[in-house]
Image: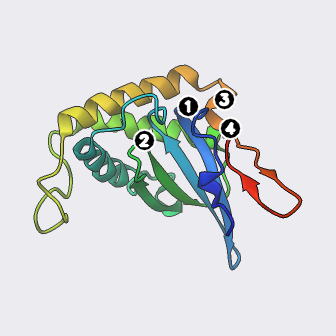
Amino acid sequence: MDLIPSFSVDHTKIIPGIFVSRVDTLGDQTVTTYDVRVTRPNVEPAVDVAAMHSLEHIIATFLRNDPAWKDQIIYWGPMGCLTGFYLILKGNHKPKDICDLLIRAFQSVEGYEEVPGASAMNCGNYLMHNLPMAKWQARKFAAYLAENAENPAIFEYPRSERLVTEDGRQFFDS
């Protein structure tokens, strides 16, 4: 069975940043999935689950209302490991090209006094939000992106090379 692309990334070397996870063609449309990595996996703590939920709501709202980008947004949601988010856009933009959008999205969190859609009618777990922690995490990541916007390492995935034996077995230590 093939290892899916997101598991071929060397998580011991990945740093916070914006990376192309995959590019797909659906009919005549190109769709790109981005790994928006907020914390360093297995080194920094994962994002608090309630804060992650709040960031999901707020940033999804921001992205789907941004005049320049709203028609290209397909999906924004958290990674199961709670170290980042997936952003799916129409087209095939370079990660650096969406850096300003994501800086503005994370900066927008500061202006919220309540989480949009955090009601029993609009959310499947409306009590699980942590806006103060979401604001802290958003400030930290927006500042990091702004400070490192010229660093190519925050836009290029570290890949794991997999040794394949003559009989087709793969070794997964990197």
Tell me the colour scheme of the image: rainbow
Q: Position of residue 76 (x, y in %)?
A: 43, 56
Q: Which mark's residue is nearer the viewer, 3 or 4?
A: 4
Q: Is residue 91 visible?
A: no
- Element on which disc 3 rests: helix
Question: Callout 3: 10 Å neighbours few (<14), some, many (20+)?
Answer: some
Q: Earlier in the sequence, mark 3 or mark 4?
A: 3
Disc 4 and disc 1: Cα gap in Å?
Answer: 9 Å
Q: Earlier in the sequence, mark 2 or mark 1?
A: 1
Q: Position of residue 57 (x, y in %)?
A: 29, 53
* Label placed on residue 83: 2
Q: Earlier in the sequence, mark 3 or mark 2?
A: 2
Classify 25 as above or below 134. Answer: below
* Label placed on residue 15: 1
Q: Earlier in the sequence, mark 1 or mark 3?
A: 1
**Which amino acid type is shown beneath numbered disc 2?**
Thr
- Residue occupied by mark 3: 153
Q: Is residue 69 visible?
A: yes
Q: Is residue 130 left or right of residue 152?
A: left
* Label placed on residue 158: 4
Q: Are marks 1 and 3 in contact (CB under 8 Å)?
A: yes
Disc 3 and disc 2: Cα gap in Å?
Answer: 17 Å
Question: Callout 1: 10 Å neighbours few (<14), some, many (20+)?
Answer: many
Disc 3 and disc 4: Cα gap in Å?
Answer: 9 Å
Q: Earlier in the sequence, mark 4 or mark 1?
A: 1
Q: Residue 114 sits in which quadrant?
A: top left
Q: Position of residue 72 (x, y in %)?
A: 53, 61
Classify 102 as above or below 169. Answer: above
Q: Going 36% across and 54% down the picture, which residue do you hit?
A: 60
Q: Which residue is at the far top?
A: 147
